[in-house]
Image: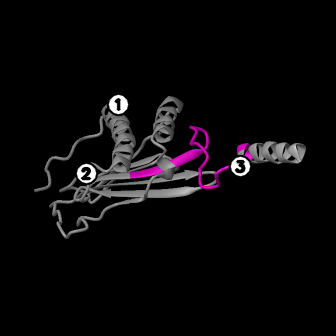
């Protein structure tokens, strides 16, 4: 009897150790992902790493399209930040502007950030609007860490390529 009980316990431990969480996405690596990131008022600035294109919102003039290609180091930094913040596992929607008791935030003009991540196994889109009712949401903070890094890289690319800034702004 002791032998059967011992065998059942050992088998249970082995099976529990082998169990995998099917909800846990594969980590993002610089070789296995592309993304589209739009940001700013109306989310009109758009970087698409699949087509190496960047559309710059010139506000009061026509948008301008550029070719921007991220190098391996930049993609490595972004994929590392995505994995550190478990970005493929966070919620997808940070756009609701009213909390549970009806307090609403209104922001004009409304800025946003949309990030679509494509890996071999998954596509995930995360949306944020500046009037989101909970700016201290821990998952939002994870998302913003990643988007801040992407925007920093975009600003560096704009400077390197001499991409002009808009001559006017939003009111």
Element assignment for label 3: loop
Is 129 placed left or right of 22 in the picture? left
- Image mark for residue 135: 2
Q: Secondary structure at mark 2?
A: loop
Residues at discs 3 and 2 in contact (Cβ within 8 Å): no
Instruction: Pick whichever of labels 3 and 2 is earlier in the sequence.
Output: 3
Question: Hey, which quadrant is residue 162 in on the image?
Answer: top left
Res 165 quadrant in image: top left
Please state the horizontal and vertical placement of residue 83, each as a whole percent of the image: 51, 40
Distance from label 3 to label 2 (Cα)?
36 Å
Q: Which mark is residue 88?
A: none
Residue 68 in percent (x, y) is at 43, 41
Q: Which residue is mark 3?
A: 19
- Going by the image, does 44 lie left or right of 17? left
Q: Earlier in the sequence, mark 3 or mark 1?
A: 3
Give percent across and percent down for residue 33. Answer: 56, 46
> Which element is circle 1 on?
helix
Pick the front one: 53 or 88: 88
Separation of marks 3 and 1 at Cα, in angstroms: 48 Å
What residue is rendered at 72% in x and 47% in y? Answer: 16
Between residues 142 and 39, which one lies in front from this camera angle? 142
Of circles 3 and 1, the one toward us is 3
Mark 2 burial class by Cα count in 10 Å: few <14, some 14-19, many 20+ = few
Between the residue at mark 2 and the residue at mark 1, the CA separation in whole angstroms equals: 33 Å
Q: Main secondary structure of the magenta part?
A: loop
Residue identified by numbered label 1:
160
Q: Which residues are magenta?
A: 17-37
Is the residue marked by circle 1 packed among few (<14), some (14-19), or many (20+) residues within 10 Å? few
């Amino acid at each position: 009897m002791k032998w059967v009980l011992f065998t059942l316990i050992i088998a249970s431990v082995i099976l529990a150790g082998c169990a995998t969480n099917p909800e846990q996405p594969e980590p993002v690596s610089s070789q296995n992902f592309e993304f589209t990131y739009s940001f700013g008022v109306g989310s009109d600035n758009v970087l698409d790493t699949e087509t190496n294109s960047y559309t710059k919102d010139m506000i009061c003039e026509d948008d301008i399209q550029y070719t921007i290609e991220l190098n391996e180091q930049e993609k490595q930094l972004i994929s590392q930040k995505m994995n550190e913040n478990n970005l493929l596992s966070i919620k997808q929607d940070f756009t609701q502007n009213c909390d549970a008791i009806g307090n609403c935030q209104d922001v004009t003009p409304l800025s946003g950030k949309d990030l679509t991540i494509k890996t071999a196994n998954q596509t995930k889109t995360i949306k944020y609007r500046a009037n989101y009712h909970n700016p201290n949401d821990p998952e939002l903070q994870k998302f913003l860490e990643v988007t801040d890094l992407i925007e920093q890289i975009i600003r560096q690319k704009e400077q390197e390529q001499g991409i002009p800034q808009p001559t006017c702004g939003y009111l």
